[in-house]
Amino acid sequence: MHCMSWLIAGVAATLAQLLFEVTAQQLRLTRLSFPFLLGSMYTQMRSWAKLIGFGNHVVNGLIFAAGYILLFNYLRICSWQAGALLGLAQAAVVLLIVLPLIQEIHPRMASERQGPTARRQLEPPGFLALNYGPRTPLAIGISHVLFGAVFGAIYR
């Protein structure tokens, strides 16, 4: 693995993904904000949660980029198309496994099985994150495909 190429491609892919996610949220395609969701695991303060979550998202992007490199080397292919396919697979894992499980570990998120409480809590994502809007699965899919495509196009 070439570290500088990994770092540049990983940061570029993560920033492209974040830009799409913010745009999708602003266009009301989804209510889901990954930076806020991640950051609110660490703090209750909304402004700090977004900042911490942004940093967490970039670190996660670099970790996943390293995983993409391992798969690219194993499959002996590195292209934007291969990256996009890996991104689609990653989106499926996020939608079907990660988001349904996050309510079990997130300290400020309600559970699907929990009734109303006096404490304000985040809404759980639900199946395919549909609690955050009917177009959320599409937005998550596109953002992860974009991550993979950008990473595959830049990494050498």
Image (spheres, rainbow, N blue to C red):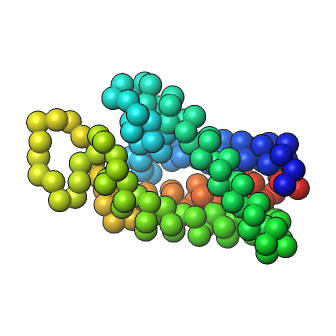
Q: Is residue 88 visible?
A: yes
Q: Nearer the viewer, residue 64 or 79?
A: 64
Q: Is residue 137 visible?
A: no
**Residue 58 versus residue 77 in the image, above or below:** above
Residue that appears at 83% across and 71% down? 77
Residue that appears at 74% across and 68% down? 71
81 left or right of 123?
A: right
Which image quarter is the C terminus in? bottom right
Q: Nearer the viewer, residue 43 or 144?
A: 43
Image coordinates for residue 26, horizontal then vertical, percent: 47, 40
Image coordinates for residue 37, horizontal then vertical, percent: 41, 42
Residue that appears at 50% across and 36% down? 53
Residue that appears at 34% across and 46% down? 106
14 left or right of 73?
A: left
22 left or right of 145?
A: left
Please identify the residue farthest to the bottom as the structure is shown. Answer: 75
**Residue 153 versus residue 55 in the image, above or below:** below
Image coordinates for residue 1, horizontal then vertical, percent: 84, 55
Tally of marks: 0
